[in-house]
Image (cartoon, helix red, strand yellow):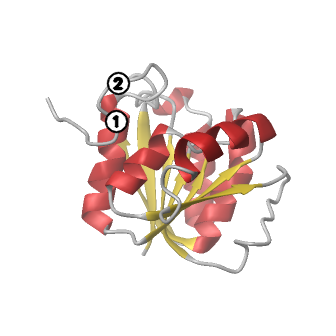
Amino acid sequence: MRTFRLYPVEARWWSFQDYGAVLDVCERLHPQRALEFGPGSSTLALIEGGAHVDTCEDDPKWAKVYRDRIENKYPHIVRLHDYTWSDPISIPALDAQTFDLGLIDGPLGTPRRYAAIEYCLERCVATLIPTEDDGRKHKSFLRPIIEAAADRLNRSVEYMETGPLSGGFALVTRR
């Protein structure tokens, strides 16, 4: 079994397969800068994968938690940005920046993720999005949204199946 430096014990909300999938993408793409929505275990995978992370949280309670757990522990690697969810999303400190990799693990509530997906696709060379469907394309809320956005922006989509929690990931890249 694969072991992880920053995620040694599997938690109920993020499987080893999910964590490993993020690390595999980092090993393949070598992102220097990552933009993430929804800090937590996914942030640790990005750090372990060698990226500097700008992570975004719209819930003030969770922002405080992850500021203590992650940003304060990795102050030269992680910057946490509080934002107010809207559609479209605007985060003035990040709006004009570009990133090597985006990772969507928030905001809470899958239907609200469309705005975060759009935000990342506009700023990131590649974006990793949990499909939350365990490979059953006909049951996924997000797959049609991901595919429509990728088509509109002339991007490629690659699906990776992981495990019971995220179900898998879509990796959307510039062609």
* Quarter occupied by residue 144: top right
The percent position of residue 172, horizontal first and vertical second, equals 47, 60
**How many numbered tags mark residues here?**
2
Compared across the picture, whether 86 is left or right of 129 comes to right
Looking at this view, is 149 or 47 the one in front?
47
Looking at this view, is 28 or 154 the one in front?
28
Q: Residue at x 25, y 39 (%)?
A: 4
Residue that lies at the very extreme toward the top in this rendered image: 12
Q: Residue at x 62, y 59 (%)?
A: 149
Q: Do tag 2 and tag 1 residues touch (Cβ < 8 Å)? A: yes
Residue highlighted by disc 2? 10
Q: Residue at x 79, y 54 (%)?
A: 83
- The quarter of the picture where the N terminus appears is top left
Residue highlighted by disc 1? 7
Inspect the image, locate mark 1, and give the three-letter code of the amino acid beneath it. Tyr
* Quarter occupied by residue 141: top right
The percent position of residue 161, horizontal first and vertical second, equals 34, 36
Looking at this view, is 6 or 49 the one in front?
6
The percent position of residue 63, horizontal first and vertical second, equals 71, 43
- The quarter of the picture where the C terminus appears is bottom left
Residue that lies at the very extreme toward the left in this rendered image: 1
